[in-house]
Image: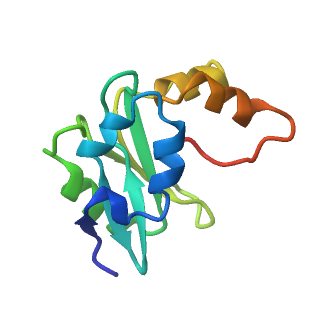
Amino acid sequence: MNTPRLLPPTSAIDYAYFRDRLADPTVLDHSVAVRLHRVSLLAVAVGGPRRGGYLSVDLLLTAVAVGDLLTGRRGFPDVRVRWSPYTDTCHVVEWGEPAPEESDAARGRFYGYREAAITAFLAPSGASGGAR
C-alpha cells in the first residue's frame, strides 16, 4: 500500500476546479490535498452551504488510512469509510452529513456548489464528473 499523506490544498490537481465552482470558496482554507500514489486530490472541508464531502479511493486499506488522517481535522466531521463489495468499484471516504438522494441538483447544493455550476453540470452538453 502506498501510504497517503496530507498536503496544502493548493497542491491538489483539482484545486482550481473546486475553487471555481464552490459557492463559498473559503472552505478551501480548511481543506487538504490527499496524496495518493503520485497524485494529490482535494478533500474539501464542510462549511458554509457545504454539508458533506467524499473522496473515492481504490484500496480499502488506503481508504481507512485516509479516513484516519481526516478524523479530528476541522471541517471533517463524522469521517467514515464506505467500502465497496465489488472489485471494480472504488471505496469512499465520506464526512459530514449523508448526501441527499432526491436529485443531482439537491446533491450539488448539499456539496456547496454555486447555482451556475450546478446548472452547467446538469446541462445536456455539460462535462460529467462527480461532486466531491
Between residues 34 and 12, which one lies in front from this camera angle? Answer: 12
Between residues 33 and 86, which one lies in front from this camera angle? Answer: 33
**95 sits to left or right of 114:** left
Between residues 43 and 97, which one lies in front from this camera angle? Answer: 43
Across and down, in percent, residue 55 comes to 43, 52
Q: Residue at x 63, y 65 (%)?
A: 88
Which residue ends up furthest to the right in the rendered image? 124
Across and down, in percent, residue 129 comes to 66, 48
**127 sits to left or right of 107:** right
Location of residue 54 with respect to 63 vertically, above or below: above
**Quadrant occupied by the N terminus:** bottom left
Which residue ends up furthest to the left in the rendered image? 72
Q: How many marks?
A: 0
Across and down, in percent, residue 84 comes to 51, 54
Tell me the quarter of the picture where residue 123 sits. Answer: top right
Does the rendering let one see residue 101?
Answer: no
**55 sits to left or right of 81:** right
Across and down, in percent, residue 5 comes to 25, 70
Q: Residue at x 37, y 44 (%)?
A: 44
Location of residue 98 with respect to 44 vertically, above or below: above
Location of residue 75 with respect to 9 vertically, above or below: above
Does the rendering let one see residue 86?
Answer: yes
Q: Residue at x 44, y 55 (%)?
A: 15
Colouring used for the render: rainbow
Q: Residue at x 52, y 30 (%)?
A: 113
